[in-house]
Amino acid sequence: MIRPPAVRAKKYRDAGLWRDVGPIDDLRRWRDETPDALAISAFGPSGAPIQIDYRSYASYVERFSGALCGRRLGRGHVVALQLPNWW
């Protein structure tokens, strides 16, 4: 079992180390509160800078999630994604 005992989980939550929200919740909050703020700054294949705001980033994440659901993947399924070290 990967999950820790309930007593340890409570201790971590009480200490503020664990929260009841995940990264997708944070992304949606940032999208709603600061849609035009910079989320990603990188260089594209041509070397030109690419900047993505939270509105666009959240849209990409939602689209990718939708594609996974369309392939009948959901809670409990494990997905691995290997990216090259360039865009």
Image (cartoon, helix red, strand yellow):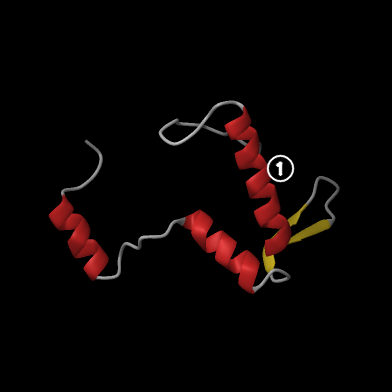
Quarter of the image holding residue 41? bottom right
- Horizontal side, residue 52 vs residue 26: left or right: right
Above or below residue 71? Residue 11 is: below
- Horizontal side, residue 21 vs residue 67: left or right: left
Q: Amino acid at mark 1?
A: Trp
Taking depth in this image into account, of 38 and 69 the one nearest to the observer is 69
Identify the residue at image location x=64%, y=65%: 31
**Spot occupied by residue 34 in the image (x, y as percentages of width and height):** 66, 73
Give the quadrant of the N terminus.
Answer: top left
**Spot occupied by residue 69 in the image (x, y as percentages of width and height):** 58, 33
Give the labeled residue for mark 1.
86
Label 1 packing within 10 angstroms: few (<14), some (14-19), many (20+): few
Extreme residue in the top direction: 71
Identify the residue at image location x=60%, y=41%: 65
Identify the residue at image location x=65%, y=34%: 67
Q: What is the total number of numbered labels drawn onto the structure image?
A: 1
Above or below residue 38? Residue 45 is: above
- Judged from the image, the secondary structure of the residue bearing numbered disc 1 is loop
Extreme residue in the left direction: 7
Quarter of the image holding residue 22? bottom left
Above or below residue 79? Residue 53 is: below
**Spot occupied by residue 62 in the image (x, y as percentages of width and height):** 64, 47
